Image (cartoon, rainbow, N blue to C red):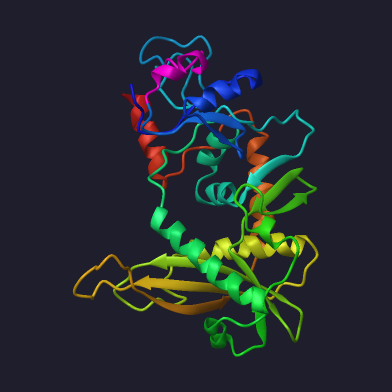
Amino acid sequence: MRSSTNTNLAVEYKEKDKAKALGARWNPEERVWYVPAGLDLEPFAPWMPGDASTKTSGKPSNPSPLSPAGEATVPYAKRRGKLYDPADPEPFAVSRTKIDLFVDCPRCFYLDRRLGIQRPSGPPFLLNSAVDQLFKNEFDAYRSRKEPHPVMAGLGRNVLPLQHADLGEWQENFKGVRVHHERTNFVLFGAVDDIWEDQDTGQYLVVDYKSTSKKDEVTPDNVWPGYWRQIEFYQYLVRGLGHNVDPLGCIVSANGDKKRSSFDATLHFNVKLITRDCDDGWVDTAVTGAHAALQQERPPPQNASCDYCAYRSVSISE
């Protein structure tokens, strides 16, 4: 049997090498071994969670907080990594994407972080990731020469790619910039694409690389609003480390050209810098709100504007 999504495993430490040899992979963020989508699950049977089987009828012995006691349960894939426990005194790591999830839907955030029930994931954006990596390689070349990249000319300022001993870690997925939020005991983190430094003021500018293919020219107003929210969260983190951060957010945009007559094994992009003044004032409110939600024993009410909540509601009622 093969699964179209990743399947979490319950692997003891002493057996991790066996699972790895069969193709299991380790998710450092969730601290769980999993079977990548598309692999045969049968060889991993010894590590399949004992409660992986699901009921589609009858009364559950432990009623789910998703539905009234006695109603039929619904099969959900559950995470096996660390979930939030209000009684646990240890700091709890929360990524930028999870805070963004709370902003989008508090109920989905609660199900994810408290109960281990994730939204279904889509296919990875591998081409976008490739463009990101190539941008990083390109800017690192200018960084090593201590020269400005040509796209920086659009700022009209004396700016260079940041030279900092921790930049590599700040850019690394599952590590990133980390700040302890004392009021909630959350460790907030996120991986930046790049940071530039104004040589005259010493301020840091948070930069994100984005690739798309739009018919119209990319502008600060027609990019997805979540991109600016992403930069604001990163600005909040870098400020949390004590650095002087310029409110100007920068996106290096690569817009794929679809008007060419042929592909010829090469994608062509129009690259430009777009900027906007950002405000991270919403972050602290969102973080404290997310923490308050996780303290509750039951999930927040369904979000009328959330398609995932609507899907779950229909599934449970059938």
Q: Is residue 175 above or below residue 17?
A: below
Q: Is residue 235 above or below residue 78?
A: below
The residue that appears at 49% across and 65% down in the rendered structure is: 134
User: Residue 107 colored magenta?
Assistant: no
Q: Is residue 284 above or below residue 228?
A: above
- Residue 154: percent from left, percent from top: 54, 86
Q: Which residues are magenta?
A: 40-53
Q: Is residue 280 above or below residue 75?
A: below
Residue 44 shown left or right of residue 197 in the figure: left
- Residue 253: percent from left, percent from top: 45, 72
Q: Quadrant of the N terminus?
A: top left
Q: Quadrant of residue 89?
A: top right
Residue 134 shown left or right of residue 239 in the figure: left
Judge by depth and name the residue closer to the eye, 204 or 147.
Answer: 147
Q: Is residue 287 visible?
A: yes
The residue that appears at 63% across and 58% down in the rendered structure is: 171
Q: Is residue 247 visible?
A: no
The residue that appears at 65% across and 22% down in the rendered structure is: 13
How many numbered marks does the figure carry? 0
Q: Quadrant of residue 212?
A: bottom left
User: Residue 41 colored magenta?
Assistant: yes
The residue that appears at 42% across and 59% down in the rendered structure is: 128
Q: Quadrant of the C terminus?
A: top left
Judge by depth and name the residue closer to the eye, 102 or 91.
Answer: 91
Residue 218 shown left or right of residue 297 in the figure: left
- Residue 94: percent from left, percent from top: 65, 45
- Residue projecting furthest to the left: 261
